[in-house]
Image (cartoon, rainbow, N blue to C red):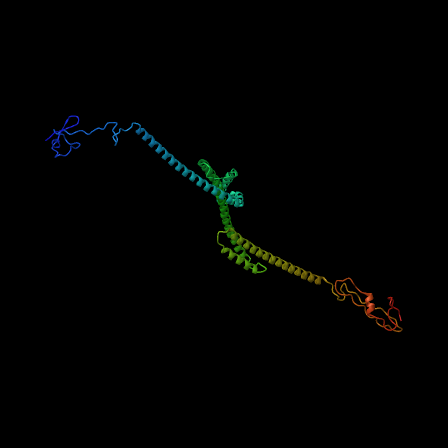
Amino acid sequence: MDEEHTPDGGETRTLADAGGSGGQPPQVGDPEPGGASLPPAIEPENDPGPAGKPRPRWLVPVIVVVVVAVLAVAGLAVWRVSSNRSHDRALAQCSRQVRAVKGSEQRAEAASSSYLQAAAVKEDQVKDAETVTDMAKAVGKAKHTQAQAFRCEASMPTDDLQAMAGKAKRIDGVYRSLDKASKAVLASRDAKSLEDAKTALNAKKDEASKLLGDSDGKVADNAVRDSLQQAISQAGGIKGGEAKAYQDAAGALQSAMDQVNASIQQKSQADQAAQQQAQAAAQAASASAAQQRSAPSNSPGRQGSTPSYRPSYNHGGGSAPAPAAPAAPQGGGSGGFDWNQWKQNHKPIGNHGCNPDGSCGIG
């Protein structure tokens, strides 16, 4: 075959002489004739680009700077987004805490009378004395808490919003502790009042039952005993958790007992008065009998009798008997003979008799 000459005068092989590859061009890694393979080609540092021009040396540093700038901008954007989210969360938390503390302040103002009432409760008035101690602590914290002006605005820094939220939370805790302690004290007081009322009512029922049995037949009006029996029955049916119901039942029992005791006293006084009257009548009868036994009699010859008086009348040859003087009255009187009464009862007969001045003439 004809040999081809390169422009530089060198000889070239024919396609058939290229290692018996059947006219194919040599491939990378194909063994050369003689059995040795070609090493991979190494490009030079200033490898020409697609257009065959060499790559500049400043290109790599510029690329690195651009990448760093892009990363910095991306990080700043991420930080800004995260910071905005933290600010939004701080603003929302501050708003919630401020609303909470304002609500607690309003409740405390409305319940101020209850707080004062709870603060005045003593340990002996409650069932659990620890509630009084907790109330004293809560009151002490509340005294040292001053009114604050809370505000949460979007223009405030995140740190200021967080500080405002923390302050509102602490003050809200003070109000909540005071409210909780006061409710616990009042509940413990009511529990003790209920327990004491039940105990007092049971004791009063026992006392009323005893009085009902002891007063049988000793009252002026038995209706009061019926009222006491009814009050005892009603007291036995009291239920519930209100101390006032038990206290009212005990009061009704006491009122019914007072009526029974008054009726007992009334009958006792009436019985005593009747006994005194009976004794006085007996004494009067005894004295009358004794007086009758000691009175003098009018029999002749006995002491105390008044002799009859017969005046003499001389009428010529004879005399008429004068009426006898009346006898002295019987009994223990001291009257004796009444001359004037005798004259009135014995008028002069005819021209004879006694003169009105008491002198008697002789016919």
Answer whether residue 340 is visible to the viewer in this image: yes
Residue 166 is left or right of residue 328, and the answer is left
Residue 227 is left or right of residue 345, and the answer is left
324 and 184: which is toward the camera = 184
Q: How many marks?
A: 0
Rendering coords of residue 40 (x, y %)? 19, 30
- Quadrant where the C terminus is found in the figure: bottom right
54 and 186: which is toward the camera = 54
Query: In the image, is residue 65 above or below residue 319?
Result: above
Rendering coords of residue 220 (x, y %)? 59, 60
Rendering coords of residue 324 (x, y %)? 81, 69
Q: Residue farthest to the left?
A: 1
- Quadrant where the N terminus is found in the figure: top left
259 and 18: which is toward the camera = 18
Residue 352 is left or right of residue 328, and the answer is right
Rendering coords of residue 65 (x, y %)? 34, 30
Residue at image location 37% in from the left, 34% down from the top: 73
Query: In the image, is residue 188 above or below residue 292?
Result: above
309 and 120: which is toward the camera = 120
Answer whether residue 130 is visible to the viewer in this image: no
